[in-house]
Image: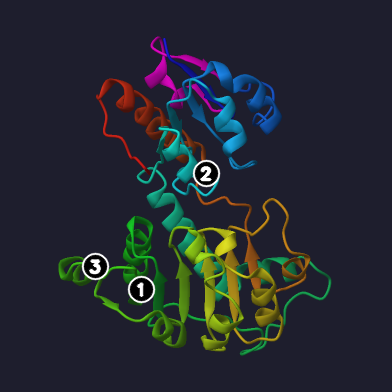
């Protein structure tokens, strides 16, 4: 029986695929195992389900003498040294399907909250000074009739586009590769160069995967290209954005607002961002519903069973 080390405390409803066929270990009293605990346990396991509190690196994989599969509990895999796993003959999988709709849903929620200043109004109404009720006072930014620029028009980007189109937005996008015309027509989306997207979009959503090449792809130079009325949304990875440059642009009103679900050094949040009224912050919560986390667990376990038994398709990274 293959041994599976799950480093998160997950609900049993999402682990039924493994019942009776795999020897599963997971935390029961705390949210996750630490790296030190994983290093101690990993030599006995064929499968590892890592978490994002530490990097699954050479040190872990060199101790994992039996390891055959790393089944990631997320669509992003920048928490794993995939190149080294490949050299060691270890397969890495991710879960792109169960994360698609909740992430797109949350990105659109951030878009609305940041543009329409929902969080700001809520906070101000709870203070003694309140909010000015004047006709034009402390106004937000409309969504209907505006252009959404999507950086990374993959599964999540397309699901976000569907929501935006339903709300009367126009879609432009930038990808490494242009989509088929049939897909573009589905969302009435127009492919543009990266710089054109930054200069012309009213709302900009970052949905591309993290790679060394996309590190700080949004920095001072890119922020300076955006409209003063632009709203920037990030539900991808925090390291893709130069947070200090973003905080400076927001403070100086060089862009209108931002909605962030991810940060460069999670769970630490840049103090400059915490001081701003024109940014909506969330704790990497795009998939944080009970139903979505169970669905993620199911897809993760199906990758394990599919790898060993062939009964499910496997979403391989390498």
Whole-percent x, y for residue 115 in the image: 54, 75
Left or right of 57 in this view: 277: right
Q: Quadrant of residue 61?
A: top right
Left or right of 191 in this view: 122: right
- Crowdedness near tag 1: few (<14), some (14–19) or many (≥20) residues, C-alpha within 10 Å: many
Instruction: Answer yes or no: is residue 168 visible.
Output: no
Give above or below for 245 relative to 34. Answer: below
The residue wearing badge 2 is 81
Left or right of 239 in this view: 67: left
Residue 79 badge: none
Q: Nearer the viewer, residue 105 or 26?
A: 26
| Quarter placement of the N terminus | top left
Whole-percent x, y for residue 38 in the image: 63, 27
SS at circle 3: loop
Instruction: Answer yes or no: is residue 151 visible.
Output: yes
Whole-percent x, y for residue 136 in the image: 62, 90
Residue 179 badge: 3
Q: Which residues are magenta?
A: 10-25
The residue wearing badge 1 is 174
Which mark sits nearer the N-terminus, 3 or 2? 2
């Amino acid at each position: 029986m293959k041994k599976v080390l799950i480093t998160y405390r997950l609900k049993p409803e999402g682990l039924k695929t493994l019942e009776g066929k795999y020897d599963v270990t997971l935390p029961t009293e705390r949210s996750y195992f630490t790296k030190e605990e994983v290093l101690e346990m990993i030599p006995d396991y064929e499968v590892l389900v890592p978490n994002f509190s530490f990097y699954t690196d050479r040190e872990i994989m060199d101790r994992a003498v039996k390891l055959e599969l790393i089944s990631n509990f997320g669509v992003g895999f920048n928490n794993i040294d995939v190149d080294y796993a490949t050299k060691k003959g270890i397969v890495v999988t991710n879960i792109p399907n169960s994360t698609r709709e909740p992430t797109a849903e949350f990105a659109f929620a951030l878009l609305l909250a940041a543009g329409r200043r929902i969080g700001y109004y809520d906070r101000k109404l709870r203070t003694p000074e309140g909010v000015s009720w004047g006709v034009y006072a402390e106004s937000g930014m409309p969504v209907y009739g505006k252009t959404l620029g999507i950086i990374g028009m993959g599964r999540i980007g397309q699901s976000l586009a569907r929501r935006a189109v339903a709300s009367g937005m126009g879609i432009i996008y930038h990808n490494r590769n242009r989509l088929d015309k049939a897909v573009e027509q589905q969302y009435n989306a127009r492919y543009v160069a990266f710089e054109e997207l930054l200069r012309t979009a009213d709302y900009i959503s970052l949905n591309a995967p993290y790679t060394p090449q996309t590190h700080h792809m949004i920095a001072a130079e890119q922020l300076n290209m955006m409209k003063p009325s632009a709203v920037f949304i990030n539900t991808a990875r925090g390291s893709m954005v130069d947070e200090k440059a973003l905080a400076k642009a927001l403070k100086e009103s060089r862009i209108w607002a931002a909605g962030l679900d991810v940060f460069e050094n999670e769970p630490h949040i840049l103090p400059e961002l915490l001081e701003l009224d024109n940014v909506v912050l969330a704790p990497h919560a795009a998939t944080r519903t009970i139903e979505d986390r169970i669905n993620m667990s199911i897809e993760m376990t199906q990758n394990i069973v599919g790898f060993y038994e062939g009964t499910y398709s496997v979403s391989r990274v390498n």
